[in-house]
């Protein structure tokens, strides 16, 4: 049921807010645990999912990238501006089904324009 543009936007914004607030929540949780020293981190992991803050993840990634300089991946997506299709024939994630259908119909209509029309009736 939740397929409307409004609900998609709400879900996206909630995810962004979770990402933004994750380091703050983690530091608050750790400060609470420091005050109550008898609680172990393993017990907390069973109750809640512990997410590594973004700034810590970036530091870890930098170390890994330095080790594997010769093995780099191309993550750049090549997308046609006219059809909005990428190199694999996929539409962007944000595009809904109606827009995809409309663009596909437009493409199919354009293909028929180049063909020569067959003669009507019998060809003597």
Image (cartoon, grey):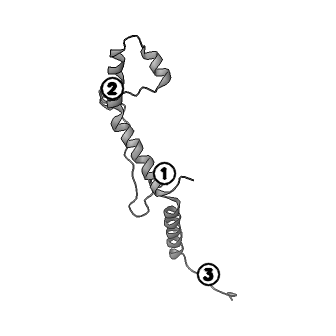
Occupied quadrant, residue 14: top left
User: Dot 2 corresponds to which residue?
Assistant: 28
Q: Earlier in the sequence, mark 3 or mark 2?
A: 2
54 left or right of 1? left
User: Dot 1 corresponds to which residue?
Assistant: 88
Q: Nearer the viewer, mark 3 or mark 2?
A: 2
Q: Which image quarter is the C terminus in? A: bottom right
Task: Please provide percent x and percent y for residue 99.
Answer: 49, 63
Which residue ends up furthest to the front in the rendered image?
A: 36
User: Dot 3 corresponds to which residue?
Assistant: 118
Q: Nearer the viewer, mark 3 or mark 1?
A: 1
Query: Residue, x 68% and y 88% (percent of image)?
Result: 121
Crowding at label 1, few (<14), some or many (≥20) Cα neighbours within 10 Å?
few
Crowding at label 2, few (<14), some or many (≥20) Cα neighbours within 10 Å?
few
Q: Are marks 3 and 1 in contact (CB under 8 Å)?
A: no
Q: Are marks 3 and 2 in contact (CB under 8 Å)?
A: no
As displayed, is residue 84 above or below residue 116? Answer: above
Task: Please provide percent x and percent y for residue 70.
Answer: 34, 30
Say which of 33 and 114 sits in front: 33
Say which of 121 and 39 sits in front: 39
As displayed, is residue 91 above or below residue 34? Answer: below
Q: CA distance from mark 3 to mark 2?
A: 74 Å
Under circle 1, the secondary element is: loop
Under circle 2, the secondary element is: helix
Q: CA distance from mark 3 to mark 1?
A: 33 Å
Q: CA distance from mark 2 to mark 1?
A: 44 Å
Crowding at label 3, few (<14), some or many (≥20) Cα neighbours within 10 Å?
few
Q: Earlier in the sequence, mark 3 or mark 1?
A: 1
In the rendered structure, find residue 49 and report the number of the disc placed on it: none
Task: Please provide percent x and percent y for residue 86.
Answer: 44, 53
11 left or right of 65? right
């Amino acid at each position: 049921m939740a397929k409307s543009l409004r609900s998609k936007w709400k879900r996206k914004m909630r995810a962004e807010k979770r990402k933004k607030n994750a380091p703050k929540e983690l530091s608050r949780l750790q400060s609470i645990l420091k005050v109550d020293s008898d609680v172990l981190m393993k017990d907390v992991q069973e109750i809640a999912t512990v997410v590594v803050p973004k700034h810590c993840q970036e530091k870890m990634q930098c170390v890994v990238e330095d080790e594997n300089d010769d093995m780099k991946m191309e993550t750049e997506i090549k997308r046609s501006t006219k059809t909005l299709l990428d190199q694999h024939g996929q539409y962007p994630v944000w595009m809904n089904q109606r827009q995809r259908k409309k663009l596909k119909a437009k493409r199919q209509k354009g293909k028929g324009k180049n063909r020569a029309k067959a003669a009507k009736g019998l060809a003597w």
